Amino acid sequence: MTDESYMVDGGLDYQRGFINTVPAKDMSVYTDGPFELIREVFCWGTYGKDGKQPLTYKPLKTLTDEHIAAILDTQWRVPDHIRDVFKEELKYREQYNCWNQEELE
């Protein structure tokens, strides 16, 4: 274990971090990576169906088809490359006849 601090900054446009004695392992996942990994690690923040629940982050693979459709229909500020991830998830589910990872195992 190290006493060093680590951080990642930049959001969706760039990446920035500290330079440490013990280098951090880059675990970034990009939209051109393996989709099986993207659907595991990409998370969407939600306040629940009624919008009144505490904020939780759900992996893409666990969102219902209806939730993804609602995001695509109502969240017009979502960048195109993120919208494409949601669309690809729907195609993936159709191809494998599933809605989450557990159904594939």
Image (cartoon, helix red, strand yellow):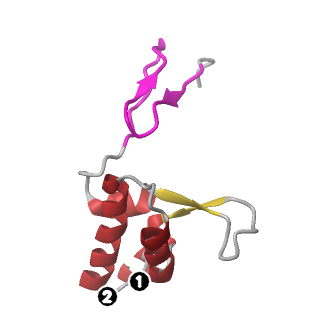
Q: In this view, does 97 lie to the left or right of 56?
A: left
Percent across and percent down for residue 101 are 41, 74
Rendering quarter of residue 28: top left
Q: Nearer the viewer, residue 103 or 13?
A: 13
Identify which residue is drawn at 48% across, 14% down. Answer: 20
Percent across and percent down for residue 105 are 38, 79
Q: Which of 78 and 28 is in front in this view?
A: 78
Residue 25 lies in the magenta-colored region: yes
Q: Residue 97 carries which label?
A: 2
Query: Which of the two labelled residues, at mark 2 and mark 1, occupies the earlier sequence position?
Result: 2
Q: Give the range drawn in magenta.
A: 5-28
Identify which residue is drawn at 75% across, 67% down. Answer: 53
Q: Residue 103 carries which label?
A: 1
Callout 2 touching callout 1 (CB < 8 Å): yes
Q: Is residue 38 left or right of residue 7?
A: left
Percent across and percent down for residue 38 are 36, 58
Rendering quarter of residue 39: bottom left
Give the main secondary structure, helix, strand or loop, of the magenta stretch. loop
